[in-house]
Amino acid sequence: MEKFSKLKELLASVEVDAEKFYAAGNSAAGTRVRKAMQDLKVLAQDIRTEVTEKKNTAK
């Protein structure tokens, strides 16, 4: 559950940069959004792996 909490925190933290990029066209904010999305992707994959392992050991 710790990784899921980190995922939510990361998503919340990138919201300001996403707004700056889409509303104001700030390209530096766009770079930060791209990096955060990559971090989210990695974290989401870690969560998927963890869930699969837990599910398979529960049998």
Image (cartoon, rainbow, N blue to C red):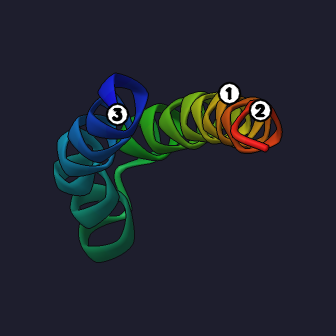
Q: Which mark is residue 49?
A: 2
Q: Residue furthest bottom?
A: 23
Q: Secondary structure at mark 3?
A: loop
Q: Is residue 31 above or below residue 23?
A: above
Q: Is residue 23 above or below residue 35?
A: below
Q: Nearer the viewer, residue 3 or 36?
A: 3
Using a 10 Å C-alpha cutoff, classify the residue at mark 3 as few (fewer than 14 neighbours), some (14 to 19) or many (20 or more). few
Q: Nearer the viewer, residue 45 or 57?
A: 57
Q: Measuring 41% from the left and 27% from the top, which residue is drawn there?
A: 3
Counting from the top left corner in percent of width and height, residue 58 is at 69, 39
Q: Choose top left, top right, bottom left or bottom right for residue 2.
A: top left
Using a 10 Å C-alpha cutoff, classify the residue at mark 1 as few (fewer than 14 neighbours), some (14 to 19) or many (20 or more). some
Q: Choose top left, top right, bottom left or bottom right for residue 34.
A: top right
Counting from the top left corner in percent of width and height, residue 44 is at 62, 41
Q: Which mark is residue 46?
A: 1
Q: Measuring 55% from the left and 39% from the top, which residue is drawn there?
A: 40
Q: Which mark is residue 1?
A: 3
Q: Measuring 33% from the left and 58% from the top, which residue is drawn there?
A: 18
* N-terminal label among 3 and 1: 3
What's the residue type where badge 2 is placed? Thr
Q: Cβ–Cβ below 8 Å for labels 1 and 2? A: yes
What's the residue type where badge 3 is placed? Met
